[in-house]
Amino acid sequence: MASSTVSRVRRQLPTGPWLFAAPGLLITGAFILYPFVSTVVNAFTDRRTLIPGEFVGLANFRELLGDDMFWIGLRNSTLYVVGVVPALVILPLLLALLVQKNIPGITFFRSAFYTPVVASIVVVGLIWVWLLDERGLVNSLLETIGVGRVGFLSDQWLLLLSAMAVTVWKGLGYYMIIYLAALANVPRELHEAAAVDGAGAIRRFLTVTVPAVRSTMVLVGALSSVAAFKVFSEVYLMAGPSGGPAGEDTTLVMLVQRTGTGLTGRVGYASAISVVVFVVTVALMLLVLRADRRDES
Amino acid sequence: MSVMEKVRQTTAKPTTAREPRVTDEHGRRIRVWELALRYLLLLAVLALTVGPFLWQLSTSLKGPTEDIFSSPPKFLPSDPTLHNYKRVADTIPVWDYALNSLKVATANVVTNCVGAALAGYALARLRYRGRRVATLVFILAMLVPVEGIIIAQFTTMRELGLNNTLVGVVLPGSISALNVLLMRNAFLNLPYEIEEAAYVDGANVWQRFLRIALPSVKGTVAVVAIFAFMGAWDDFLWPLIVLSDPSKFTLTIGLNYLHGTFAGDERLVAAGTIIAVAPLIALFACLQRYFFRGVGEGAVKG
């Protein structure tokens, strides 16, 4: 009975629904789906910013295989996933456990830990460029304790590592909140039972907490790996637009931005790199989800 | 059965425990050394997360004669001055950039709230042919990695003659698929009965949407608004690509320019970053609840 009323409610005004959905569909179609399709199409052309270009088959992809800068970009973006994802799956969970108990002042700490998430990546990048500067705070402190100064931003690998640290630093609070929600659903009784059985804190963490928030860990792994592979701003700000003196710190998205923009931008070639980004992104998602399923069985 | 008893015990405890001692969320007492260790760790993480912002603030307040490179470092400015903030305004039109950011962020809030609420309502409540297809369109759009389509978005903007305009900055994210799906879920969670009653009373679809459904999902609208504001204010890659005229820059692009041109002048860059981050920290301090709620809702769908 209720459902017949519902359907009558919904059936009223046949043009109404499309009027409601139209703005959203229009924007999504014009600025997300159309560009997506045209990226895939352009990848098979030699289109440039001011020249429409022609179909060239797989030429762009063949060129990619011999392009050193592409391999550097692919390497750096992949390393970024390898370096950032484990840290972002584990550290925010530990942080969530730290702020989980309702002790006095804990809401202040939770909010404070979230501050880096709120700040723009440009602000965060520039703050750390100054902190890690040859004469910046971190080096002043290192010198004070007698370690000596470290060229965080001048060495190719240290710079990439520093950028990863910045990504982790900015992401901690975000994933901490996700974990907090998951931890709230872990039944207290499991911890108690484990404690009665004589399990220590670390053992309880591994046998009770981790299995209980496993699906959240997979979610965080999927979200952070996709985001890490598409890294742009951190490295762009810390290494400069060209990714270091010889471009050794270039990431794939930096390469897309550099080759595809400007009056002489090679839209076709940049689109081919973008297609690689799509494929790897999807592959990462499937990989994480598959690993999840294998764990379960 | 014993489990049931335990559940009752633990849920009953917080209400009975009135003594002013430190307890956890289950009313259980925390040992002193454990508590001390917790606060120690909390303070360490606090220094690590908030410290960098404070150091930037301190640097921005140090005058031209004060040594900012000293070792050991000096954390507090000996003679705090706003001199550097004045210098930023003399070097780049930073207040114009702030106004541009504000325009972009405000427009993004309005378009996302209105567009996502309308589309979300259409997906959740209205029946029409192609509804499933429309839902699928938004789900697919949500999965497209934006970083991979920026070049094509830029050529689309050029074709529309909107490159290098603030409208061009706003348009691609003006009604995000994620927000549409968030609104759809919020509407789906409302009971049908109220709208049925309104229908029986002769309310048309607009009246039901505006007077009944929309006021019931105010919380989600607030989440959408806040994340739309933050996303637009903080965005970097897209405005970097679409804006080329320095007079149109938003704050993030202006900061990048400041850093690129005056990299050696740390006090100046520090003052610029504080100008860019202060409004958002203030917003966050006032509306924390919604920021945290947004993470939960966005993550489940994202």
Image (spheres, grey):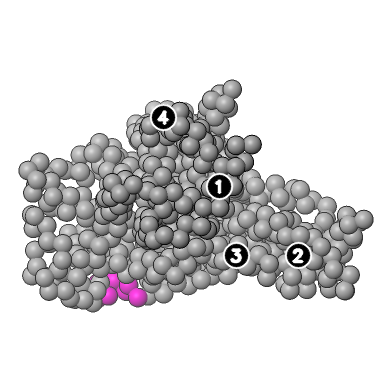
What residue appears at the point 42 percent right and 47 percent down from the top-left corner?
Answer: A96
Confirm whether circles 3 and 2 share one chain: no
Q: Is there any visible trace of residue A198 in the rendered image?
A: yes
Q: Position of residue A257 (x, y in %)?
A: 41, 48
Q: Amino acid at mark 2?
A: Leu
> Height in image: B249 above or below A135?
below
Q: Amino acid at mark 3?
A: Gly
Tell me how far mark 3 sits from mark 4, CA to CA. 42 Å
Q: Is residue B91 magenta?
A: yes
CA–CA distance in space, label 3 to label 2:
24 Å
Q: Nearer the viewer, mark 4 or mark 2?
A: 4
Q: Judging from the image, what secondary structure is the residue with disc 4 in?
A: loop
Q: What chain is tagged by disc 3?
A: B
Answer yes or no: do the residues labelled 4 and 2 have beta carbons within 8 Å? no
Q: Secondary structure at mark 1?
A: helix
**Pointer 3: what residue?**
B219
User: Label 4 sits on what residue type?
Assistant: Ala
Res A259 seen here: no
Chain designation of label 4: A
Give the image location of residue B88, x and y in percent: 25, 72
Q: Residues within 10 Å of mark 2 (few under 14, many from 20)?
A: few
Residue at point 55% right, 62% down? B223
Alpha-carbon neighbours of circle 3 within 10 Å: few (<14), some, or many (≥20)?
Answer: some
- Could you tell me which quadrant the N terminus of chain A lies in? bottom right
Badge count: 4
Q: Which residue is mark 1?
A: B9
Q: Name the residue tied to disc 4.
A: A199
